Amino acid sequence: MARMSQELKNIMIENVKTVGLEDTVQDIAVLMNKHQIGCVIIVNEKQPVGIVTERDIMKRVVYKGIAPKNLKAPDVMSKPLITASPSTPAGDAAKAMLKWNIKKLPVAENGQLVGVVTLTDLLRVEGVIE
């Protein structure tokens, strides 16, 4: 069972959807719906600075009854952004995700976003789910 020693670069999703600081929550929701994804990474000059997940939108917008076009990414994004490097072993990534109670972990190298790994990806690698 050496699978959890695989590095994130072999597991991560590389085509990560990003938005900028000026994008609205409505823009983010449209993008997430279009691509059927659960999160987007917020970037400032190509550097990842935050993440917006479906849960963030639910807790910080829908629950409060705020119109999504009235909020921008920084108003709802989770920060500081917890990241891992491409060489991080899957097991270490899983431990960090449990510690920080997150389900999506951006992967960055030299300050640049290179991918994202989800808890589901890690469970799939371990053979817990297919």
Image (tube, rainbow, N blue to C red):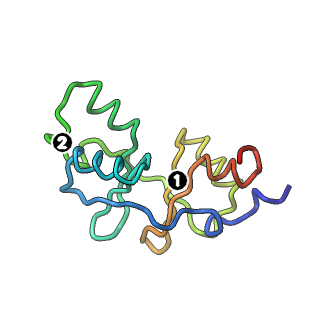
Q: Residue extending furthest bottom?
A: 110
Circle 2 residue: 71
Res. 22 image quadrant: bottom left
Say few, some or many: other residues with alpha carbon within 10 Å of mark 2 (under 14 / 14 to 19 / 20 or more): some
Q: Residue extending furthest left?
A: 70
Q: Nearer the viewer, residue 35 or 61?
A: 35
Q: Name the N-terminal-most of marks 2 and 1.
A: 2
Compute the Cα span from label 2 to label 1: 24 Å
Query: With respect to residue 109, does 116 lie above or below?
Result: above
Q: At 22% from the left edge and 44% from the top edge, which residue is drawn? A: 26
At mark 2, the secondary structure is: loop
Badge number at residue 105 = 1
Q: Give coordinates of residue 72: x percent, y percent.
A: 20, 47
Query: With respect to residue 2, does 32 lie above or below?
Result: above
Quadrant occupied by the N terminus: bottom right
Tell me: 123 left or right of 2. Answer: left
Q: Give coordinates of residue 37: x percent, y percent.
A: 43, 49
Q: Give coordinates of residue 91: x percent, y percent.
A: 71, 54
Tell me: 69 left or right of 74. Answer: left
Residue type, numbered disc 2: Leu
Query: With respect to residue 51, does 54 lie above or below?
Result: above
Say few, some or many: other residues with alpha carbon within 10 Å of mark 1 (under 14 / 14 to 19 / 20 or more): many
Tell me: 37 left or right of 6. Answer: left
Q: Give coordinates of residue 121: x percent, y percent.
A: 62, 52
Q: At 36% from the left edge and 37% from the top edge, which residue is drawn? A: 56
Q: At 24% from the left edge and 43% from the top edge, which residue is drawn? A: 75
Residue type, numbered disc 1: Leu
Q: Check whether the beta carbons of the residues at disc 2 and disc 1 lie within 8 A of each other.
A: no
Q: At 34% from the left edge and 52% from the top edge, which residue is drawn? A: 34
At mark 1, the secondary structure is: strand
